[in-house]
Amino acid sequence: MAHNLSENDPYVLVLYYSRNGATAKMAGELARGVENSGIAARLRTVPAVSPDSQASLPPVPDTGAPYCSSADLRNCSGLILGSPTRFGNMASPLRYFLDQTSDMWLDGSLTGKPAAVFTSTGSLHGGQESTLISMMLPLLHHGMLIVGIPYAEAALMQTRSGGTPYGASHWAGDDNKDAGLNKSEILTEDEQTLCRALGNRTGKLALTLVSGYA
């Protein structure tokens, strides 16, 4: 992924929560698609939410992407949001982060910027589409422009794993065994293709809008 961005360089924020690594793997593929469009991708995650009010995490995670700051979100040119499904909804850590963005709703920081969503589920019909839609709702309240995957992408019609017109998705199965994968593969070829396609589409739209307002 691109590094050493200057303060004014446009970027698409790929923001996700991942418990077992599949959503993080998708985030990497989406970021590759973004950067193939000609705009930088910035990978960020959110910390877990604990029921223990005294629990705390280090300010920087030991591995993986850094935690997302308010400035990362406020200053992005586009957003791609990802979460594993939790009972047909986004995971609570991501929801908690979004619940803290009322200041951006008030000042319209995200209005008119493109946004896309992605998810990973343990079962093939485990709430992929409802989870994607649940992530769209706060983005619509922020005035963002939702980007989906058109059926012009051939992988959307031929996939036997994840993939929806509402956003990229992954079917993890039982440690990926149901999807015919081993843990080192994680994503099917179609899932990778659709992740990159969605990242590329979001990146191109972000670039177009940035250029239009420049």
Image (spheres, helix red, strand yellow):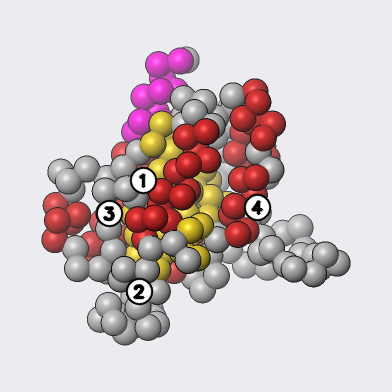
The stretch of residues the image draws in magenta is 203-213
Per the picture, the main secondary structure of the magenta-coloured stretch is helix
Above or below, comparing residue 123 to residue 43 in the picture: below
Amino acid type of the residue that numbered disc 4 sits on in the rendered structure: Tyr
Residue 57 falls inside the magenta stretch:
no
Residue occupied by mark 1: 199
Apparent side of residue 192 relative to residue 102 in the rendered image (left or right): left
* Front one among 60 and 107: 107
Residue 37 quadrant: top left
Residue at (44, 62) in percent of width and height: 88
Mark 1 nearby-residue class (10 Å; few <14, some 14–19, many ≥20): many
* Front one among 18 and 2: 18
Residue occupied by mark 3: 164
Residue occupied by mark 4: 96
* Secondary structure beneath label 3: loop
Give the label on residue 123, or none: 2
Which of the two marks, 1 or 4, is nearer to us in this view?
4
Residue 35 in the image: state x and y as whole percent: 39, 43
Residue 205 falls inside the magenta stretch:
yes
**Comes first in the chain, label 2 or label 3:** 2
Amino acid type of the residue that numbered disc 3 sits on in the rendered structure: Thr
* Secondary structure beneath label 2: loop
Residue at (79, 69) in percent of width and height: 52
For the residues bearing labels 2 and 3, Cβ distance under 8 angstroms: no
